[in-house]
Each structure stands twice: as C-alpha cells, then as structure tokens.
Image (tube, grey):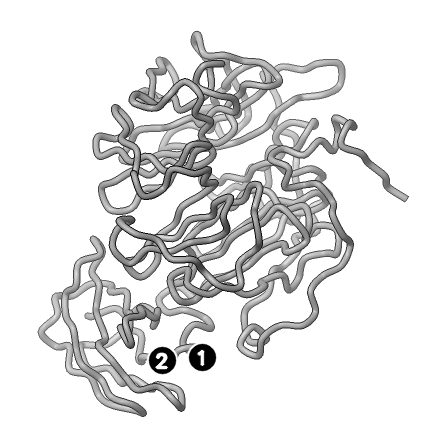
Amino acid sequence: MVTWSDTDPYFRPKHHLMRIRAFSVPVLLVASQMVLAQWTPLGSGLQSIRSITSQGGALYAATYPSGVRKSTDNGATWNQANNGLPVSGTSVFCESVGRNATHLFAGTHSGIYRSANGGADWEIANGTLTATNQVYADKFFTFSNVTFAVFAGTVANGGGIWRTQNSGTTWTIGHSGMGSNVRVHHMTQVGGTLYASTSTGVWTSTDLGLSWTALSSVNYETFSLAASGGDLAIASVFGYRYSTNNGSTWNDATGDPTGPTSGEMIAFNGGLIALTADATGCVRSLDGGMTWSPYNGGFSAIDVNALEEFHIDGNLLYVGALFDVYSVAGSGVGMDDVSAFHGRVYPSISGGEYRIELPEGSTGGILRFLDASGRIAKAIRVGAGSSVLDATALAPGAYVLELVSDERSLPMGRVIKE
C-alpha cells in the first residue's frame, strides 16, 4: 500500500492541489452531466505530475522528483528526458515544463533550463533569476512570441513574472507596476489583453507584460481567469465569479466550490473547466461561468483530489495528477455536449445556411456569430423550436456561436462558413 504525507518530498503538493482531503468520487451528477465526455487515464505509470506540455507531436511531463518524461506515442510509454538537468542524488527537482515555437523550458530548483532538440539535451537559461526550492519557475506561457515564466514566491523575494523574447538567453522584468508583496498564480490572454491572477487581485497588461495595471473590481486573491462566449470568469478566494462587461462588475457563480485556496480555470471546447483544491476535483461550466457542475468522470478516487495543471494540445485537454495523466477530447469544430445542453446549430460546415434547434422550454433569443477576434459578425433573432438561419453574407471562416436570452449568454458551439 502506498502512503505519503505533506512532509514527504516525493509527494509534496505543489499548490496544495495534491492534499488528499477525501477518497470519494462524486456519484450524483445532474442529468446533463451524464452525457458529457469523460476523462481518459493514459496509464502512464508516472507519479506526481506537476506540469505537462507538448511540442513536435511529443508530450512532456514534469514529474517530481524524477524530472522530465517524454512520450512520442500519445502517452502510452514515457522515457526520461533529463540529460543536462541538475541532479541532486538521484532526484531531479523539476516543477514545470513549457514551450515556445523553438524551445522547451524546464523550471527546476536550480533555475530555468531550455532544450532546442526535443528534450534530448538541456542547458541552463536562468541568467540572474532566483533559483531555490522556494522560488522557481512554476509555470510557462507564450503570448505573441514572448515567453513568460511565472515564479513561485513574492516579487520581493525574486518571484513574479519574467519575460524573454530570445528563448531565455536574456530575461527582463515582466511584473512592472505590481507591488512587492504580489505572488502571481496564473496568466491568460483575452484578445489583446494579458490578465495576471495574483494574491492581491487581477492585473492587466496591454503591452505584453511590460507594464501592469490593477483591475479595480478585483482586489482580492484570484487564482485563475478564463474567457468564454465573450464573458470573463475567475476562481478566487470568494468562489467563482463571472463578468459580462469585461470585468467592470462581477457576479457570484452557482455550483462552484466554497472558499477555494488555489485552482486553475481554462476555456476548452466552448465551455470552462476548472480544477479545485479539495474533494470537489474538477468542475465545468457551459454558460460562461454562471453555473458549475462536477466533471470528474474517469478520474481515480485518489487522483480526483490531486489534480495539477491543464495543457491543451490540438483537440485534447490534458491534466496531470498524483498517479497518472488524463485527457479529454474536444469535438473540434463543434462542442461535444454543449449542443445537447442548450440546443444545437448544424451543419458545422456550410455555405451559410444552418438550422437551429432549441430544447423544450427555451424562449429563443439573439444568436450571435463571433469571429476570431470576438467581434459580433452577425446577429439573428431566433424563436423557440427549430428554424433555418441565413448566414450566407458572412465572410468565410470559423465562428463561435452564442445565444443571448434573458440577459444570459449561452454557448451554442462553433461553425465554419465556407
């Protein structure tokens, strides 16, 4: 029987997400949840998966304290990829992996390392950045050819955000404007704005992290932010909240965990998915963050309490846990189960004529076609039941659909106009 404790370095929680609070999986789901796609365990044989990334058709996992593992067969088998990484005894204390267009990055207790050959070899790329077992590169993000390293620890202690435009040859401050007491948890890009979720609230940047401004409506600890259907959603110490006016005001969600202490939220396949720091495990929203329900099908009873970070690769969403890596597939053009929840628009690919079918009880509303930048390209009033839509005047391209009804924005999938 495997046992562990919070003091065991082999199973030390990274963000308290891996503290085992209970060994039960929620079994009572709302009716709509029963049709949702489930998580698939990869049977990786890995343990304590801190972080996942992908590059060139391969998957990479930061496993603590065993370093980086690489899979070239969709997670069926994994091999060590630690050549050049710092070794302490038999351990490689790697907390994170990330990527940009040309390099992989690994955040270790001895600094940031990079690889230009798919993890075959690593070299130090830390410069003068802090590197300890308390302050290290915890997460990597790349936006518009700028790579960001989010460090554990406060800005005053060498943490915060650091940015590079030359794959780690040089690093510059990426948290200008933030206070010295700020601890950064996560970054997200929505349109041309970067959002940083921190211990003091949400900060925004419109110049790719050169300067930051506090979002006055959120002055409390926030762990992650995501966008769906034109709305924003946050995971905070006061629970999950959503905004329909670009963050000017916020509303409390329902069905979300009470008093989260950490967590990560991500937009995927037309909805929002979030990790929690307790036995709630994973939750999902299909209406822009207004309501949430459990999304734990497929997780083991232990791993549901020990979920780490998300990673999207193409049509797959991955999450690492204590004893395995899990994935769930999106539907590509449309959304696998959102249509069954709010109705559906079909076919997914058309010259401009579509049909919308709304579930019984729906009063209809305004169906919006949102282009790649989130702008409303077309709006059509639709009634209850089934009707034909004429969108032949739309420019060719992919569009996200949302139904605005009773001041609510409901996701309706995606279509392609030929």
Residue under the point 47% across and 48% down: 235
Q: Secondary structure at mark 1?
A: helix
Q: Amino acid at mark 2?
A: Arg
Residue 81 falls left or right of residue 190: right
When asked about the image quadrant of residue 203, the answer is top left
| Residue extending furthest toward the top | 128
Placement of 249 over or under 255, stated as above or below? above
Residue under the point 76% across and 59% down: 24
Q: Which mark is residue 340?
A: 1
What is the x, y in percent for residue 265? 47, 49
Q: Nearer the viewer, residue 356 or 279?
A: 279
Residue 366 falls left or right of residue 264: left
Tag 2–tag 1 contact (CB < 8 Å): yes
Residue with the mark numbered 2: 344
Q: Distance of mark 2 from mark 1, alpha carbons?
A: 7 Å
What is the x, y in percent for residue 69? 62, 34
What is the x, y in percent for residue 66? 69, 28
What is the x, y in percent for residue 32? 53, 77
Placement of 274 over or under 18, stated as above or below? below
Q: Amino acid at mark 1?
A: Ala
User: In the rendered view of the protein, which quadrant contains the N terminus?
Assistant: top right
Residue under the point 53% across and 20% down: 136
Q: Nearer the viewer, residue 94 or 78?
A: 94
Placement of 156 over or under 295, stated as above or below? above
Q: Nearer the viewer, residue 351 or 273?
A: 273
